[in-house]
Image (cartoon, grey):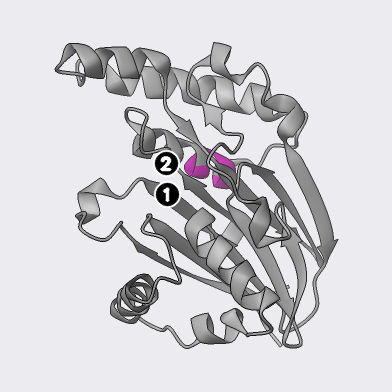
Amino acid sequence: MNTSATAWWAPKSGNTANEYEDAYAVKPEALRFAVADGASETSFARQWAELLVEGFVQGAPSAAELREFVSPLQALWAEGQKGKATAWYSERKAADGAFSSLLGVTIEGDRWRALAIGDSCLFVVRSGKVLRAFPLERAEQFSNRPSLLSSISRANAGVWSEVATVEGVLQASDRLLLMTDALAQWFLVEAEMGRRPWAALSKVTTPEQFAAYIDCLRAGGALRNDDVTLVTVEVAA
């Protein structure tokens, strides 16, 4: 399958780009794509989210391989944070680890497969309809305590059973939308109301347009104020 990919992102309203704690990675030649949402209340969450998405597109693990996949990334995270915590409370938070969701998608031939921990979501759009929503299917399923991957091994004891996987068949003109949680929740609310959020997002063609659209949604109360990330994968007709 011939595909093309675009990625748009925006920090929380009132924050700078340096305070953005989501991450995404796109590797079109390998047909691997990933987004992650670093938990803001943990230390160095952006760095952890970046390690997860970059690791996924370099070599996508299966659910059974995820524990082994995460281990060297945890070592890289720990090494990268040495000496960065400058206050006692920062050191304590760093010792507790960083947390992040992970959504990764791989395309092989005419099939796609996805792996997820947490509430970053994939939507497969075909012929003007949402064919698949994963791992959450309804807006009411979002919560304040999603399962997240930790940069500290001991914190992942209960996570491995929460890994979700799914796969499906691709057709020409399919669109795969990978989103972090705030945008995904908005997307599901809109879809459940009979609207076409994928059509609205397809009109965005520049980073400036994406930022303006996100600002508009926030101002109207439709989108909660959080970092947002969107990766769109288009399958050629």
Residue 94 covered by magenta stretch: no
Q: Residue furthest left?
A: 86
Query: Residue 188's x, y, as percent?
Result: 63, 68
The amino acid type found where label 1 is placed reads: Ala
Residue 208 lies, with reference to residue 104, above or below; the image says below
Residue at 51%, 38% in the rendered image: 52
Report the magenta stretch's main SS.
helix
Amino acid residing under circle 2: Glu
Rendered location of residue 40, percent (x, y):
36, 38
**Residues at discs 1 and 2 in contact (Cβ within 8 Å):** yes
Q: Is residue 19 visible?
A: yes
Give the number of the disc on residue 145: none
Q: For the magenta stretch, what is the residue range?
A: 53-57
- Classify residue 160 as left or right of residue 220: right
Task: Say which residue appears at 65% left-offset and 22% top-offset.
Answer: 68
Number of the label disc, if any, that sits on residue 50: 2
Instruction: State which quarter of the image contains the C terminus.
Output: bottom right
The structure residue drawn at horizontal position 82% and vertical position 56%, both measured from the top left corner, is: 167
Label 1: which secondary element: strand
Task: Answer with mark 1 or mark 2, whichever residue precedes in sequence.
Answer: 1
Q: Nearer the viewer, residue 128 or 69?
A: 128
What residue is shown with label 1? 23
